[in-house]
Image (cartoon, rainbow, N blue to C red):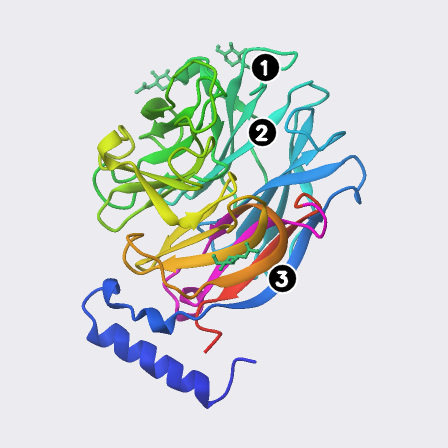
Amino acid sequence: METGSRLVVLWLTLLLTAVMSPCVHAIDPKQIDPLLYEEQLLWVSGVEGNVNTYRVPLLTYTPKGSLLAFAEGRKLLASDEGSKFIAMRRSTDKGATWSPTSFIVDDGTISDGLNLGSVVVDEEAGSVILIFSVCFHLHGCRPSSTMMVESKNDGLSWSAPRNLSVQLGVKNFAPGPGFGIQKRYSPAKGRLVVCGHGTLEGDGVFCILSDNHGRNWTNGAALKSIPYNQPKRPQDFNPDECQPVEMPDGSIVINVRNQNNYHCRCRVVARSRDGGESLPIDDVTFDYTLVDPVVAAGALQKDGVLYFTNPANEQHRVNLTLRWSVTHGKSWENKVLQIWAGPSGYSCLTSLNSGSPEDEKYIFVIFEKGKKDYDETISFVKIHLYGGQ
Ligand SMILES: *[C@@H]1O[C@H](CO)[C@@H](O)[C@H](O)[C@H]1NC(C)=O
Ligand SMILES: *[C@@H]1O[C@H](CO)[C@@H](O)[C@H](O)[C@H]1NC(C)=O
Ligand SMILES: *[C@@H]1O[C@H](CO)[C@@H](O)[C@H](O)[C@H]1NC(C)=O
């Protein structure tokens, strides 16, 4: 229940903080005390017809204030290859109820089908763009292509897939998984920045850029693996799946899967100060607090606070945990929210950003969750940032 004097006191405190502090950096970290407020399983593997396994969930807000959830619907097998649907569900009431699943892309019977993916909201154009790959593993098909679909009506309908490799050139690029960003601050305000990774040998973090709302795309920053284009050994530098966020200073911080556990069993953090055109090695760091079992993780920048989700364990995909930083990722609060102790895999974060007090209170998480294996279900969680007080 959201009534009672405790909440009134909380609101007065928030109001005073907002009035008295000149910038969002003054948020008192003690005010953040997240509570797992609501949870729903959006997809359950093996239950609905035509889909063996749901994996790789993405979550986004829309310019109209809806939430869209996506996942790969792997038709016959649990493996990364094989043919798939892109499954989508839509919520227009802040995650309380969801539309039935619609399959917005179907790759047919291809031996190495589509892989999600990165969802990016173009607030200037009012559109939602989804970028994915096909034939990423070159298993019985070639070449690998980077594809895009777009919705201009809040996710109700989607364009036919468009082949971005025509503009970008043919290369193995697996976007995300997670969301791409539209730059809100300079440099390159308005630019769409979508980051992902290459193939095993040609691995690394790569970003693609669009300065005209997704019509034209160019290749941007590359943070290549070492040795590049050669087979890897354990502990080689092998940056992989990644999640970019824009910081208030206009730089892009990319939180990266450390595929071969180079230097630590923890996350790699890269930074671009030129709108996604470069990722200098001088700005690559290792975040020892963010221990990681080699997985795709979630990150979100909201109202001056950086949030992070992953299965917080050095060895296994278990223990899905939310962390937050009020120092732009330089340090993390000691307190954490354990979202699920058991098997948990990929995760993605979003929030509604209307500026209303209601939307400031919540963030949303989608993640792979199971009892024996992390690929049993896709769970949606609504988190009240001040609810634990
Ligand atoms: C995408 O375009 C590239 C470059 O023209 C081409 O080689 C590739 O076959 C195309 N992929 C698809 C799925 O049409
Ligand atoms: C954008 O792409 C279209 C084809 O899709 C091409 O005709 C046009 O010249 C491109 N514009 C720029 C600025 O590159
Ligand atoms: C879960 O994560 C928390 C926070 O990092 C950590 O203290 C705890 O040891 C982890 N538990 C397991 C089983 O990994």
For mark 2, give the secondary structure: strand
Which mark lies nearer to you, 1 or 2?
1
> Reading the chain from its start, which is encountered first: label 1 or label 3?
3
Q: Residue at x 59, y 14 (%)?
A: 138
Q: Would residue 128 be found to the left or right of residue 44 on screen?
A: left
Q: Is residue 38 above or below residue 206?
A: below
CB under 8 Å between callouts 3 and 2?
Answer: no
| Magenta region | 348-373
Q: Nearer the viewer, residue 325 or 118?
A: 325
Q: Which residue is mark 3?
A: 39
Q: CA distance from mark 3 to mark 2?
A: 26 Å
Query: Where does the image place residue 9, in percent across and percent down from the top left?
Result: 38, 86
Residue type at mark 1: give it. Answer: Leu
Q: Which residue is mark 2?
A: 115
Q: CA distance from mark 1 to mark 2?
A: 12 Å
> Reading the chain from its start, which is encountered first: label 1 or label 2?
2
Q: Residue at x 25, y 40 (%)?
A: 189
CB under 8 Å between callouts 1 and 3?
Answer: no
Q: Is residue 158 above or below residue 37?
A: above
Give the crowd class for mark 1: few <14, some 14-19, many >=20 residues within 10 Å.
Answer: some
